[in-house]
Amino acid sequence: MKLFLDTGDVEEVRRAAGWGVIDGVTTNPTLIAKTGRGFRETVLAICEACPGGAISAEVVATEFDAMLKEALEIASWHEQIVVKVPMIEPGIRLVAQLTDRGIRTNVTLVFSVSQALLAAKAGATYISNFVGRVDDFSGDGMEAVASTVEMVEAHGFESEVLVASVRHPQHVVQALACRAHVATMPYAVLAQLFKHPLTDIGLERFLKDWEGAGLSIFPPKVTA
């Protein structure tokens, strides 16, 4: 499963990219607005910070002609860019047109299998199923993810199912269990994947034993 970082913070992207485990970055208008920087400037900096990664940048218009104009502009900025499109009627129409032009797309704000079907039929590269927002309303966001993965695989669609609105590491584990293709998450959640109390206890014990034995990886320095 691919791991994407969900952020507009270029420094977070640099740090996570340095770990060698992320495959891309997703942004949205809210995340970009939080940076206090220009949209194009931020997206290009993210592309530079995550070489070769898929970088999702979202259109903000909701009328088809304006959406198309924005999408073509955004796609022209960098070859790594994936145009992010909301799950609305003109959005699906846009995805179909961009697919015909060879432009990758990410359909966002998907909450149901029926919505995912439309995105897949239109040729979406990624289908962003939101889970955290469903869980907030006492639902089970992973149900739609599992059904969408099954639908995509059963019918031979090329779209990848992307688990979005990830709130904690358990969502990542559940995404794996559902055989999702991608999970995108905030930096704090990605960093939590490293953590386990038994790892900390074990490492502390190893280092204490090593130090107590007076061992060294490097040979002792020879003094004249």
Image (spheres, rainbow, N blue to C red):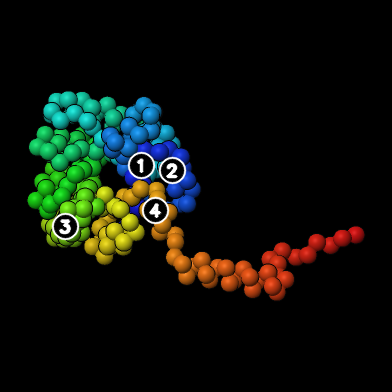
Q: Residue at x 26, y 65 (%)?
A: 177
Circle 4 sits on which residue? Answer: 190
Q: Is residue 167 visible?
A: yes
Mark found first going from the N terminus, 2 or 1: 1
Secondary structure of the residue carrying numbered label 2: helix
Mark found first going from the N terminus, 4 or 1: 1
Secondary structure of the residue carrying numbered label 1: loop
The CA distance from mark 4 to mark 1 is 11 Å
- Are discs 4 and 2 less than 8 Å apart at CB? no
The CA distance from mark 4 to mark 2 is 11 Å
Task: Please tell me whether mark 2 or mark 3 is closer to you in this view.
Answer: 3
Secondary structure of the residue carrying numbered label 3: loop
Between 104 and 209, the residue placed more toward the observer is 209
Going by the image, does 79 lie left or right of 128? right
- Are discs 2 and 1 less than 8 Å apart at CB? yes
Between 10 and 124, the residue placed more toward the observer is 10
- Are discs 4 and 1 less than 8 Å apart at CB? no
Secondary structure of the residue carrying numbered label 4: helix
Circle 2 sits on which residue? Answer: 12
Q: Residue at x 28, y 30 (%)?
A: 74
Residue 1, by quadrant, is: bottom left
Task: Please tell me whether mark 1 or mark 3 is closer to you in this view.
Answer: 3
- Are discs 2 and 3 less than 8 Å apart at CB? no
Mark found first going from the N terminus, 4 or 2: 2
